[in-house]
């Protein structure tokens, strides 16, 4: 017990955590989105195996391959795609992926989330009534269903979300 504490303290002083190395890579392959209002309302994406869950229900997930020009997933008919070379601008942009259209609109303000200023875009999935909140640096950080009176916003639990920049989190 004492030796574990010394190792942990040394890692802490060096600025790393036990989640570095292989464990960090594993964590970067899983992204959790939850509602602050109701923790039972959740969405989990996982790579290797390619799965997802909505609440307690499990689903297969389909992801774009590494050599494709998009970051994307499809889970239970819900589709998300953003070009890998996407450059945010001050105007709306549109793109299509496998016959499905997306519209990216910059937020009217730059929000600070947990003390960090982020450039966030709304990415609306045309026909699905779903809004994705996306940051090029941090990836997919939130999801909201449109058209309901008071839908929950599912927010990312980890520091880096799906489709985050390779250098997100210092990796």
Image (cartoon, helix red, strand yellow):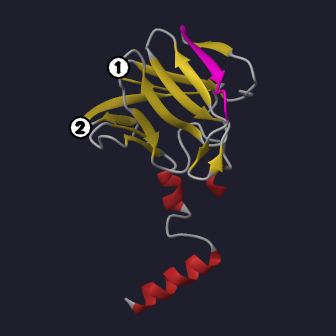
Q: Characterize the magenta stretch by its predominant secondary structure.
A: strand
Foreground mark, 1 or 2, reads: 1
The N terminus sits in image quarter: bottom left
Relative depth, front residue between 30 and 105: 105
In-image side of 65 versus 78 (left or right) = right
Q: Which mark is residue 56?
A: 2
Q: Quadrant of residue 140?
A: top right
Identify the residue shown where x is 76% and y is 25%: 89
Locate residue 75, reporting x and y percent.
Answer: 39, 25
Relative depth, front residue between 28 and 34: 34
Q: Which mark is residue 97?
A: none
69 lies above or below 25: above
Which residue is under mark 1? Answer: 149
The mark nearer the N terminus, 1 or 2, is 2
Q: CA distance from mark 1 to mark 2?
A: 24 Å
Q: Which residues are magenta?
A: 99-109
């Amino acid at each position: 017990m004492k030796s574990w504490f010394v190792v942990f303290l040394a890692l802490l002083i060096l600025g790393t955590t036990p989640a570095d190395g292989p464990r960090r890579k594993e964590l970067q392959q899983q992204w959790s989105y939850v509602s602050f209002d109701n923790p039972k309302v959740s969405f989990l994406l996982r790579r290797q195996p390619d799965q997802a869950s909505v609440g307690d229900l499990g689903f297969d997930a389909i992801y774009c391959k590494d050599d494709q020009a998009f970051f994307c997933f499809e889970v239970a008919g819900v589709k998300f795609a953003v070009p890998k070379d996407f450059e945010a601008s001050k105007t709306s942009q549109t793109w299509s992926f496998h016959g499905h259209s997306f519209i990216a609109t910059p937020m009217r303000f730059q929000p600070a989330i947990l003390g960090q200023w982020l450039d966030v875009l709304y990415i609306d999935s045309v026909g699905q009534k779903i809004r994705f909140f996306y940051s090029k640096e941090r990836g997919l950080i939130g999801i909201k269903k449109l058209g309901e009176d008071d839908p929950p916003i599912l927010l990312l639990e980890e520091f880096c979300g799906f489709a985050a920049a390779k250098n997100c989190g210092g990796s």
